Image (cartoon, rainbow, N blue to C red):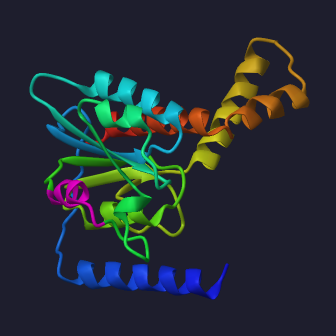
Amino acid sequence: MKWTDNFKAYMGRHELRTHLKDRKRTPVVCNIEHARHIGIIYNATEGVSFEIIRNLVKDLSGPSRKITVLGYVDSKKLIDNYLYRKGFDFFSKNDLNWYSRPVSPLVDQFIKEPFDLLINLSLENHYPIQYITALSPATFKAGKYSPDDIYLDLMIDIEKEKQAMKDLQQEIGKESNRKRSKDEIEADIQKKTESEIQLNFLISQLMHYLSILK
């Protein structure tokens, strides 16, 4: 990494810490069933992610629930199709300052929303998404586990969950007397490294845990 990138990363962390000093937030556990206002933020760079998020929004939608979605496109060009997605807002690298802080009115509005539940569905640690997640006053925040993320209240460790699934799969195989080779099992786990499968997996696990919270 170039020294300029290190300096930009330092400036980003410094500004985020500065903003957070003036913000007081006490997390309150929120079950998915009781969440009336849900915010979803995700990496919209890959087109397949939009389809997955759109299906999630359909599943979560209801007459007494508001869902606000913000996607980050890690590029300086927004795909034209993104501009006509009703109910979805997007921002790109063109909406970032020199050290990657979002400077978009859409982002400012999203940060101000008092969500009952904020779901971060980014699989990577993009600073703009981390910045928004950290400054959101959402009552409860959930997303993918990262050792560097201290802004989420509920985190799903995909690797641990995959191992748990692998163990369960092996146990089921024993119970049903259906033998599978080690290579076959490893191949199934490897498939989950694809971003769209990981995203679907993250969503399913988040929905599971958010549904059983008390």
> On the image, which quarter does residue 207 sit in?
top left
From the viewer's perspective, tell me whether residue 118 is left or right of residue 8. Answer: left
Q: Which residue is nearer to you in this view: 183 or 115? A: 115
Residue at point 45%, 66% (across, down): 127
Residue 129 visible: no
Image position, residue 20 (x, y; %): 26, 78
Split into 4 quadrants, where in the image is the C terminus? top left
- 73 to 14, vertically: above or below: above
The stretch of residues the image draws in magenta is 103-112
Q: Where does the N terminus fall, quadrant-wise?
A: bottom right
Q: Residue at x 64, y 48 (%)?
A: 159
Q: x, y (%) of residue 37?
A: 16, 41
Q: Quadrant of residue 38?
A: top left
Report the residue at 51% width, 61% height from top: 125
* On screen, residue 146 above or below 8: above
- Verify whether residue 106 appears in magenta: yes
Query: In the figure, is residue 22 to the left or right of 212?
Result: left
Of residues 203 and 185, the one drawn nearer to the viewer in this rendering:
203
Q: Is residue 132 magenta?
A: no
Residue at 81% over, 31% down = 187
Residue 29 vs residue 190: left or right? left
Magenta part, dominant SS: helix
Asked whether residue 61 appears in the rendered view, the answer is yes
